[in-house]
């Protein structure tokens, strides 16, 4: 948190639940909310993971960037997570790309290999327990 | 103070009042999962953008002389609050000595 001499805190102006690109920067009274959380990292101490490329491990999320993977249920059927429309279901392995996923290092979301503009999402702005895929955006529930 | 007794301005080390290393470039990183950083755009606006390797527009430093945060790309410009401190918006402008 960056605070000036008068107690004003650097913050994102706008909706605090969404991680905007190109968001304007401003000052607000100190609340400690996410919108005010900035950390200062000196250029020679910036972690290499912030510039990670395809195939490298993102240590925060524990996933290899850009490498396709499948998600298999541990139920006796051993079925695979599949994408039907925008719904996520378990189906028997069929080798199609709809059953493959990858971690996108830029957006930090899991995307479908079938439709790469879709990311995993919790329906209704995170207010339900149903998962789907949706156009990638920057809200975190 | 006589000119011959004046100490030279420090160009290294830590300013403990402000908590910055002097003249050492740094990024301002958002603590959201994408870790976007603050970027100075057009020598004026401050916006969040994905980090780019060696982009000086995304780097800032603390200037010991003016006690302001300056852009590492536009070194004559410091961070300030718009409308003489009455606005909520931060931007970069030519360094001045007003404190809001």
Image: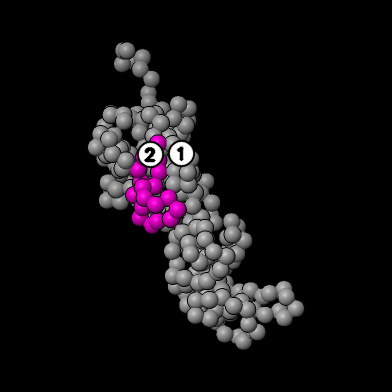
Question: Where residue A79 sits in the image (x, y, percent)?
Answer: 67, 80
- For the record, the magenta segment spans A10-29
Q: From the viewer's perspective, is residue B70 above or below residue A7?
A: below
Which residue is drawn at the image coordinates 36% and 14% (left, top)?
A: B5
Residues packed near mark 1 inside 10 Å, few (<14), some (14 to 19) or many (20 plus): few
For the rendered model, the colour scheme is: one colour
Q: How many marks?
A: 2
Say left or right for A111 vs A15.
Answer: right
Residue A12 drawn in magenta: yes
Q: Is residue A43 something one can see in this rendering?
A: no
SS at mark 2 in the image: strand
Q: Nearer the viewer, residue B99 or A12?
A: A12
Say left or right for A116 vs B66.
Answer: right
Mark 1 sits on what residue? A31
The subunit carrying tag 2 is A
The subunit carrying tag 1 is A
Is label 2 in contact with label 1 (beta carbons under 8 Å)?
Answer: yes
Q: Main secondary structure of the magenta part?
A: loop
Residue A16 drawn in magenta: yes
Question: Where residue B28 sits in the image (x, y, percent)?
Answer: 43, 45
Question: Do the dots labelled 2 and 1 sit on one chain?
Answer: yes
Q: Which mark is residue B44?
A: none
Mark 2 sits on what residue? A28
């Amino acid at each position: 948190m960056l605070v000036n001499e008068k107690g004003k805190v650097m913050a994102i102006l706008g909706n605090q639940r969404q991680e905007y690109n190109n968001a304007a920067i401003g000052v607000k009274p100190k609340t400690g909310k996410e919108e005010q959380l900035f950390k200062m990292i000196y250029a020679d101490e910036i972690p290499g993971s912030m510039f990670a490329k395809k195939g490298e491990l993102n240590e925060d999320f524990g996933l290899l960037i850009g490498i396709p993977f499948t998600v298999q249920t541990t139920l006796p059927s051993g079925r695979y997570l599949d994408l039907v429309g925008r719904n996520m279901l378990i189906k028997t392995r069929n080798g199609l790309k709809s059953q493959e996923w990858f971690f996108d290092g830029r957006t930090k979301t899991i995307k479908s290999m079938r439709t790469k503009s879709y990311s995993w999402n919790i329906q209704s702005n995170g207010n339900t327990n149903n998962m789907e895929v949706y156009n990638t955006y920057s809200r975190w529930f | 103070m006589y000119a011959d007794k004046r100490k030279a301005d420090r160009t290294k080390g830590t300013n403990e009042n402000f908590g910055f290393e002097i003249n050492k470039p740094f990024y301002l990183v958002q603590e959201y999962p994408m870790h976007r950083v603050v970027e100075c755009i057009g020598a004026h606006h401050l916006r969040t953008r994905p980090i780019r390797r060696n982009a000086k527009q995304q780097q800032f430093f603390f200037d010991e002389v003016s006690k302001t945060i300056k852009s590492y790309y536009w070194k004559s410009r410091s961070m300030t609050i718009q409308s003489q401190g009455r606005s909520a918006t931060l931007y970069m402008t030519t360094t001045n000595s007003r404190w809001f």
